[in-house]
Every structure is written in C-alpha cells, then in structure tokens.
Image (cartoon, grey):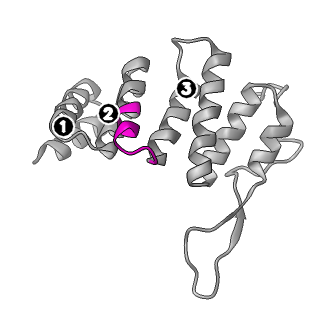
C-alpha cells in the first residue's frame, strides 16, 4: 500500500492524526494542488484553521486558477472559529466569487448563498441560488440547463432572518 492509499485509509477509519501526518509527508515530497487541498481539508476537519488556509493558499500559489482550492477556502472560512464571524463570511464570499468567476458550479453558488444568508442578505442569497447553469454532463441530444443551487430558492427556504426549527 503506497502513502496515498495509507493516508486515505487512515482518514476513512477515523485515524485523522495519522492521516494528517501522512498527507504532510506526501506534500513535502509532492506538493501539487490536489495533494495540498487534501491536506488543507484534513487540517480543517481537525480545527487547524490557519494551517488549513496555508495549505490551500499553497495550492493556489502553484496554480492560480485551481478552483477547488478557492472553493475549499470559501468553505474553510464559513466554518473557522479563530477569526470574527463577519470577517470570515466576507472572506468566504470573496473566495467563492473567485471560484465562480473561473468555473461556475452548483456547489459554489450554493455555498455563496449560505454566506449571504449568514451576512443577512436574502436578496443576494436568492439570486445566488437561482443562477442558471449549463449542465456539465453531456446528454445524447443536448445540454440541459439547471438552476445553480442544490436547494431551490423560495421565500420559504431562503429566509435569512429566521432560524430553522429543529
């Protein structure tokens, strides 16, 4: 079993610290953007906010158009607990908008809508969830159009001021 398989297996069975050490070793010898994103995502899982950000920024230093790193930076900032929430949401919005500018995706628009909700901007949240996208999956006859958001925007589910009842 090679190092990559060991890291994946360790993470899969919940040995996150072991997986972290393996991904750090992998990134020392092969610091490519996908590997650095794996490292950043795992550091985020462990609540290591700044080191997670550093790994994702290192991926972008290698490939400035690596949208997965931008998406992960957006997600990281949505969850981080080491900086003020409004600043984190602003950073998340910035990274998600950069990812969308290069490669629009339903996932990026969905997370962008969530950041707008956290920032109490329901109009922008609604807009982000209603952007039409061309399907990336080819069909036999034509390309279909779908809405960007994974959850349709309606007045009932895009209500940024009400808390959802459990």
Q: Which residues are magenta?
A: 57-65
Which of marks 3 and 1 precedes in the sequence? 1
Q: Main secondary structure of the magenta part?
A: helix
Residue 133: give x, y in percent of width and height: 68, 62
Image-quadrant location for residue 111: top right
Whether tag 2 and tag 1 are in contact, CB under 8 A, the answer is: yes
10 Å crowding of disc 2: few (<14), some (14-19), many (20+): many
The C terminus: image quadrant: top right
Is disc 3 surrounded by few (<14), some (14 to 19) or many (20+) residues within 10 Å?
Answer: many
Q: Residues within 10 Å of mark 1 (few under 14, many from 20)?
A: some
Where does the image place residue 63, in percent across and percent down from the top left?
38, 45
Q: Position of residue 74 (x, y in %)?
A: 55, 34
- Whether the magenta-drawn stretch holds residue 39 is answered as no
The reply to whether residue 73 is visible in this rendering is yes
In this view, the residue in front, 30 or 25, is 30
Residue holding disc 2? 39
Q: Mark 3 or mark 2, which is nearer the start of the sequence?
A: 2
Q: Which mark is residue 26?
A: 1
Residue at 22% over, 30% down: 24
Residue beneath disc 3: 77
Numbered label tally: 3
Q: Position of residue 7 (x, y in %)?
A: 21, 38
Q: Residue at x 84, y 35 (%)?
A: 122
Relative horizontal placement of residue 22, taking residue 105 as reference (left or right): left
């Amino acid at each position: 079993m090679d190092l990559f398989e060991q890291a994946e297996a360790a993470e899969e069975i919940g040995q996150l610290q072991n997986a972290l050490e393996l991904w750090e070793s992998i990134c020392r010898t092969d610091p490519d953007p996908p590997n650095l994103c794996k490292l950043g995502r795992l550091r985020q899982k462990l609540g290591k906010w700044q080191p997670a950000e550093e790994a994702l920024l290192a991926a972008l230093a290698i490939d400035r158009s690596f949208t997965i790193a931008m998406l992960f930076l957006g997600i990281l900032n949505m969850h981080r607990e080491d900086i003020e929430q409004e600043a984190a949401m602003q950073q998340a919005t910035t990274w998600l908008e950069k990812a969308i500018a290069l490669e629009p995706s339903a996932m990026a628009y969905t997370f962008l809508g969530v950041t707008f909700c956290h920032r109490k901007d329901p109009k922008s949240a609604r807009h982000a969830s209603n952007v039409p996208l061309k399907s990336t999956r080819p069909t036999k006859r034509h390309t279909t159009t779908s809405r960007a958001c994974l959850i349709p925007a309606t007045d009932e589910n895009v209500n940024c001021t009400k808390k959802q009842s459990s």
